[in-house]
Image (cartoon, helix red, strand yellow):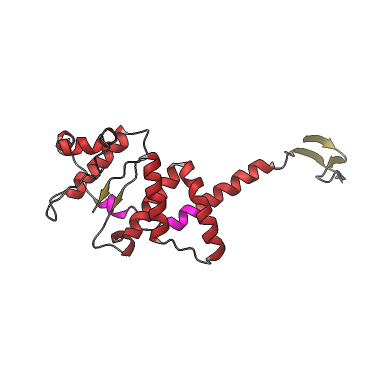
Amino acid sequence: MSTHNSGPGAMNFPNSQGVQINSSAGGTQYNNNYYGPPPSGSDQERERLELEKQECLRTLSFSSLDSRRNEISVVHLETGDWIFERPEFQDWRDGTNNPAHNRVLWIKGHPGTGKSTIMKHILKYCEEVFKDHIVASYFFHARGDSLQKTPLGLLRSLTFQLLDNHEPSYQRFLPSFRRKKKIQQKLEWVREILDTHTVNSNRTHGPLMPTDI
């Protein structure tokens, strides 16, 4: 409902309870108000569920989650594209066509030889080529904090990315979050729960997960 009044004298308009509120003054009055409907129950429920999802994701995230990836240099001028021609990479990329393939791409080398740089290049390739896939990544950091160099940090990061980008996975994870929230004042995830959820999601949806070790 909208009300509009201009001119001298009294001004009447209903409040939210239906009571007439009168205003009178000696000068000219101008009023232009809009009284829209209150938020519907469905809008409030959507907002509540979105806030709950953000709370769930915060319990998985940590401050150094992307720091190792961000500090790795990028490959310039296609100098790293050779990796895409290697049969080992192509077997890994097309692993869904070969059930016998374990879907692990293992890159070995001495420290400082560019393994992480190549992995970041592969990640960029996957993000551009497999737009219909869930592409998650994690880069271990041997000199980082405890979560940057442990399996728990890996699982928290991959689970965070999976839930943030795939609603069905989040819905399957949500009961675990709600149960733990009821019994723990400060919610802490353990490796076993995240490991089970991530493995099951990988089997169901087959996301590509480049991981640097």
Query: Which quadrant would the N terminus be assigned to in this image?
Result: top right
Residue at the image position 54 percent from the left and 56 percent from the top: 178
What's the magenta region?
A: 56-71
Provide residue 78's location: percent of width, then percent of height: 17, 35
Query: Which quadrant would the C terminus be assigned to in this image?
Result: bottom left
Q: Is residue 77 visible?
A: no
Residue at the image position 25 percent from the left and 43 percent from the top: 102
Looking at the image, the residue that sits furthest to the bottom is: 185
Vertical placement of 86 versus 65: above or below?
A: above
Horizontal side, residue 156 vs residue 114: left or right: right
Q: Find out whether residue 160 is within the magenta segment.
A: no
Nearest the eye: 196 or 54: 196
Residue at the image position 81 percent from the left and 39 percent from the top: 28
Q: Find out whether residue 65 is within the magenta segment.
A: yes
Provide residue 12's location: percent of width, then percent of height: 86, 40
Horizontal side, residue 163 vs residue 73: left or right: right
Provide residue 200's location: percent of width, then percent of height: 40, 47
Provide residue 38's location: percent of width, then percent of height: 72, 42
Residue at the image position 80 percent from the left and 35 percent from the top: 6
Nearest the eye: 93 or 139: 93
Vertical placement of 116 versus 189: above or below?
A: above
Looking at the image, the residue that sits furthest to the front is: 100
Q: Main secondary structure of the magenta part?
A: helix
